[in-house]
């Protein structure tokens, strides 16, 4: 099962946050551990400086045979409490140790000693290292090379002695480091878990709130009915990133509406344009079959049916061309006056008069131009009175085809509604085989050809003007 985007976002953010907390905790642990070790080294060095005079005293006492070799430093119990210390002379013999060692020894340094003529005790070399106490406990130690001056001579009979060289190791366990680190680790873990829990709740709420517009969009899509393609998706308080998605969905709906409208127009136009040929085909067949006839009559009827069928096929091809994506610019130039003249002659009526004028060319298939002209003339003859005047002229906008007829009873809303599908100015008159799609189909053809069409009513006359781009030879 594919996880939801909500779960993915929350899981990813929590994983990143947990990784950040772990990295931060690890870094804090390392920094504090380093600082604690530095402080431990400072404490060791301070204890070393405090112990140096007593080590020198022990050395003097040993030289005077007052203290035994390797005696415990117990004369100042508070001085080295909690400190492991041992000192060796230049020959490697232990001269003093802390009571905690209980007779055991610390690791003795192997480095050679350097002589110093100073009259005061001096720390020649200082080194820090991790060691193990006699009981195996890890510890931190500082090793020092001390040059102890010879004692002042109280008698000229005493043989003068030179400075003594002593190696001293002072050690502390890591308790001052490990215990704070353990507390710190537990505290970091506790704070991290609490922070992760609170952050998880906050992230889940924020992600849910952030995905709210997507949920709104999902609900709108689910509630979109097929018959409601005019719906527009709205997202209240949507983030900027979702606005392109909303706009693209609305654009997709507009394209769907356009495609559906084209399909409906195609169906309506097909019904409108095929109504008359089908009626003629039916009438021819009925008349031919109502009684026995001569073979020549049957051949004539079949020829008429074939002509009607070819006319229907041409009509269907023309309608299909309107719904295709092919550009009319791919069509060869066509003489518009010749097409208009043929259409006027095909009507075989004296009511249509074509005025003389220019013979312009347009880029369009003859079938489209013939269908356009035929529908304009048929509409004028059916709904108008008197003669129909047809003119063809060149204008700055292109080639203008005008069809004018008398219509004293034209309604006031005719210019705005004449091109609506299935609208009829007077449903009580006219040929019922037409569904009111003549001018609507004309508009579709003109828009496909890149032109414009308009209708005007003035002084009892209706004028339909079509402007098409003129083809000019280069």
Image: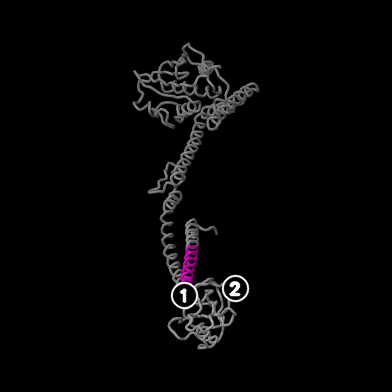
Q: How is the image coloured?
A: one colour
**In the image, is residue 33 part of the stretch drawn in magenta?**
yes
Residue 256 locus on image (x, y percent): 49, 40
Residue furthest to the top: 356
Q: Mark 1 points at which residue?
A: 49
- Residue 62 versus residue 25: which sits nearer the camera? 62
Which type of secondary structure does the marked residue at label 2 adopt? Answer: loop
Residue 170 locus on image (x, y percent): 51, 77
Residue 236 locus on image (x, y percent): 38, 48
Residue furthest to the right: 295
Q: Which of marks 2 and 1 is nearer the N terminus?
A: 1
Give the dominant element type of the magenta stretch: helix, strand or loop.
Answer: helix
Q: In this view, does 91 lie above or below 467?
A: below
- Residue 20 versus residue 363: which sits nearer the camera? 20
Residue 226 locus on image (x, y percent): 47, 45
For discs 2 and 1, the disc positioned in front in the rendered view: 2
Asked whether the viewer can see residue 439, the reply is yes
Q: In which quarter of the image is the C terminus?
A: top right
- Residue 137 versus residue 258: which sits nearer the camera? 137
Q: In this view, does 448 lie above or below 61?
A: above
Q: In which quarter of the image is the N terminus?
A: bottom right
Question: For the residue carrying disc 2, how many other residues have a C-alpha within 10 Å: few (<14), some (14-19), or many (20+)?
Answer: few
Based on the displayed image, in which of its 4 quarters is residue 430 positioned? Answer: top left
Q: In this view, does 465 lie above or below 44?
A: above
Q: Where are the magenta residues, as a range?
A: 22-48
Spatial CA span between label 2 and label 1: 21 Å
Which type of secondary structure does the marked residue at label 1 adopt? Answer: helix
Q: Mark 2 points at which residue?
A: 112
Asked whether the viewer can see residue 286, the reply is no
């Amino acid at each position: 099962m594919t996880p939801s985007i909500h779960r993915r976002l929350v899981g990813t953010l929590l994983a990143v946050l947990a990784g950040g907390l772990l990295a931060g905790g690890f870094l804090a642990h390392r920094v504090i551990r380093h600082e604690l070790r530095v402080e431990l080294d400072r404490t060791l060095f301070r204890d070393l400086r405090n112990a140096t005079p007593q080590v020198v005293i022990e050395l003097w006492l040993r030289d005077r045979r007052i203290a035994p070799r390797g005696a415990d430093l117990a004369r100042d119990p508070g001085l080295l409490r909690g400190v492991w210390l041992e000192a060796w002379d230049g020959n490697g013999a232990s001269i003093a140790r802390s009571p905690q060692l209980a007779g055991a020894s610390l690791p003795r340094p192997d480095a050679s000693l350097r002589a110093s003529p100073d009259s005061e005790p001096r720390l020649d070399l200082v080194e820090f290292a991790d060691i193990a106490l006699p009981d195996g406990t890890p510890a931190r130690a500082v090793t020092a090379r001390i040059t102890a001056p010879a004692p002042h001579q109280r008698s000229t009979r005493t043989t003068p002695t030179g400075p003594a060289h002593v190696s001293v190791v002072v050690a502390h366990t890591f308790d001052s480091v490990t215990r704070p680190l353990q507390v710190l680790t537990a505290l970091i873990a506790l704070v991290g878990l609490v922070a992760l829990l609170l952050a998880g709740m906050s992230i889940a709420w924020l992600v849910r709130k952030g995905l709210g517009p997507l949920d709104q969009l999902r609900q709108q899509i689910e509630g979109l009915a097929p018959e409601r393609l005019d719906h527009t998706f709205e997202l209240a308080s949507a983030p900027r990133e979702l606005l392109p998605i909303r706009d693209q969905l609305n654009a997709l709906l507009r394209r769907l509406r356009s495609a559906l409208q084209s399909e409906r127009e195609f169906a309506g136009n097909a019904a409108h344009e095929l109504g008359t040929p089908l009626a003629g085909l039916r009438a021819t067949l009925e008349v031919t079959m109502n009684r026995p006839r001569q073979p020549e009559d049957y051949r004539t009827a079949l020829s008429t049916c074939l002509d009607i069928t070819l006319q229907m096929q041409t009509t269907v091809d023309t309608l299909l061309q309107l719904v295709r994506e092919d550009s009319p610019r791919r069509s060869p130039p066509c003489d518009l006056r010749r097409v208009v003249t043929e259409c006027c002659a095909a009507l075989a009526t004296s009511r249509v008069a074509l005025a003389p004028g220019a013979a312009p060319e347009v880029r369009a298939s003859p079938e489209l131009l013939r269908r356009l002209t035929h529908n304009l003339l048929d509409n004028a003859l059916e709904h108008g009175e008197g003669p129909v005047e047809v003119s063809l002229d060149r204008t700055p906008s292109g080639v203008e085809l005008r069809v004018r007829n008398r219509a004293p009873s034209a309604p006031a809303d005719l210019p705005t509604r004449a091109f609506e599908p299935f609208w009829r100015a007077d449903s009580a008159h006219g040929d019922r085989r037409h569904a009111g799609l003549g001018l609507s189909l004309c508009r579709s053809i003109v828009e496909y050809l890149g032109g414009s069409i308009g209708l005007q009513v003035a002084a009892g006359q209706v004028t339909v003007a079509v402007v098409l781009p003129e083809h000019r030879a280069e």
